[in-house]
Image (spheres, coloured by chain):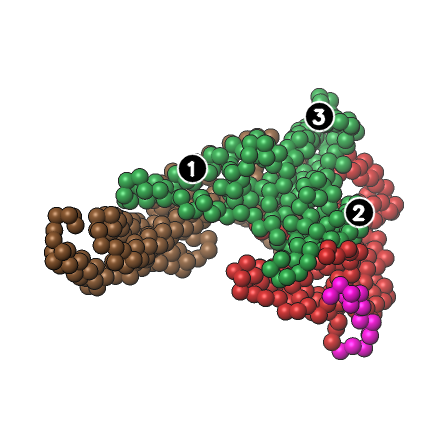
Amino acid sequence: MRALIGPKENQASQVYYRTLWWTDVQRPSLKMYGRRATDLIRGLDRAAENSIPPYNGETVRAVCEEIKDIFEANQQDTGRLQSQADTSSHQNILHSIHFRHIAMERNKRCLVAYHYNRAERLRSIRWNLGGIIPREIRSTLSEKEVEWFNSYNTELTNYMMELDGLNLTVHQRPPKEHFIHVRVLLDYGDYETEDGETIHLKKYTRHVLPRTECEHLIRQGVLEHVHV
Amino acid sequence: MDGNDLETQPEDLNTSNTSETTTMQLLAELKDIWRNERFAPELLPHHVDLVDCLLEQVRVMEGNVGKARGKEPYRCHVHKMELNRIRFMLSNYLRCRLEKLELFTTHYRQLSAEQQEHFLSPAELTFLNNFADKTDELLTNSVAPYLPTGMPVLDAWKKNPARPKLDSFVFVQPKEVLEGVILDAGTQDGREEEIVTLEEGGQYLLRYSSVREHVMANRVLLM
Amino acid sequence: MSTGTFDPEELEFLAEETMVTIIPSARYPLFYMLGGDVGPMEPSIPVPVPLWLAVHMRQRKQCRLVVPDWLAVEPLLKLKEDENNSPVFTSMPTKHYIEISQVILESFGDEIPHSNDIRRLTKDILDLRLAKLRASVDAFIKGSNVYAKVDNITEVELCSLRNLLTRGVDQLDMLRSAGTYRAPVAAATVEDSTTLSTNPGSAVRSSRLFSSDRNTSVNS
């Protein structure tokens, strides 16, 4: 380009570019990069530990838009760097590029952290609630998350299949036998426990039985939990 | 196997390895490796043979209990309680390992094939690979459609993945005398490296990195 | 689930593996347990069983317990006195003394004389030991130590120690790796770390609970 224009025009174009750069920086529509990304993270941070707030697709896309804008701006500036003969404003341009790049990387990092943290919560759901997503939760997930949950479920199931029937999600707490005192409310007759033991449940008698055995009988009104 | 029931003394089982090992010994071993796995900041070498052996013992006993149902309810109950305890230990041990794999996915994926074979059971390796792929997919595909074409999403993350914190403090009880244990006080403090000898049965507080090899070789118990 | 520590329920689970002696009230055959044979049991004949089984049998009113020797007022008073007089941890009858005493008192409490006193004494001993622990951990972290001998420590104290340590040490590690932290010049060098405070009346409990005494050869 230098070859095509004389020294005076060169000076003029220098001023032009410098002005352009200034207006770039002072563009009124320029906002602080990374605000939407922070919103994303903050929303998750506020949520209670074992819950999943609704997928914030709108903000995710906004952050991506910002990344696109940054990317394009940097592409432009890189072009400027390459085409511009006068290197005096190179430093400034390089600084802009670098600054935008960091902002872009931060946005990407927030996006990854957001989706990763949600996946962690989903994982807990699998361990605590089983392989079927409860309806209330399903509506808060993105389609891709539902897909991920299902494949996690499959991976876990396949892994446990190698364990001779040991279900890791069932034996999460140390086994504790809870016996409770119960009183029989009506003449039920003979009751066979899980172990094949027969107990005669006669009205007004008291027994000490494992909680698991009693629960449904209490619900049916056959037994009454007595607090000793 | 047929004819085994709760009233007959079970045969001692032969592990695929070397000598006859009783189930009692296997359970004692499980307790040790369980403890170590819980306290080690990284994944320890797998013990798939031990686990498989115990799982089978549990299954056989479960079958015997089923056969005795109704005949000896009290005996059944006691055996079931023990089985629940063993299942808890096994589950807890295996779950701890899965958690480490999920936490440090990229790190364990980066191990050589040889190392992976040493540390992960075949089933764990399959789990790791599928889990890693699917999670990468989720993270990438949730945003890639809205980004410039071909822009990498996970590059920075993969370059600096979460890794086990090997300098965490652990409590250690050596099973034998350990000489030449290097305490790394951190050369930034200008301290010199120190070497100590740990007595058998003593109890120490140290950085895991100082005793890492000994843990892997089962020469110490983590507390 | 947290890698790196056991929670109270898990500690109790571990403690329940301990063998205790019971006196059954009925006859039971030999149980071929995977963890070792139990029984056979004859009424009124003492027999060793794992604690978890003793608890179960008690709930069904099928046994009495032979209370371990150390779980009584006199022995515990002595232990408490020893603990009070020693700057370091004294040896406890078992690594699970707290969990075992709690389980036994809960399940067999009405058989045990002075159970309230026993409960109080074990708690007193624990409090004494935890106080020693806190002072030592403070010194340990501030001195940027990377080694300590912690003889006679028990499970519950280990858990407490882990909690105290992790918070402090992780922060320091972070600061150190960021190059912003310089350890204060350690008062305890290898040479003078062998002195343990032997002054029983010392108001400030010595922080020498952790013996930094090493059989060491310093790399020069």
Q: CA distance from mark 2 to mark 1?
A: 46 Å
Location of residue C42 (image quadrant): top right
Mark 1 residue crowding within 10 angstroms, few (<14) / some (14–19) / many (20+): some
Which numbered marker is on residue B134? 1
Identity, as a three-letter code, of the amino acid under mark 3: Ser
Disc 2 target residue: B177
* Quarter in which the C terminus of chain C is drawn: bottom right
In the image: residue C54, left or right of residue C173: right
The magenta stretch is: C189-203
Identity, as a three-letter code, of the amino acid under mark 2: Val
Q: Which tag, 2 or 3, sits closer to the chain's start?
A: 3
Mark closer to the observer (2, 3): 2
Disc 3 target residue: B16
Q: Which tag, 2 or 1, sits closer to the chain's start?
A: 1
Q: Residue furthest right?
A: C45
Q: Secondary structure under badge 1? A: helix
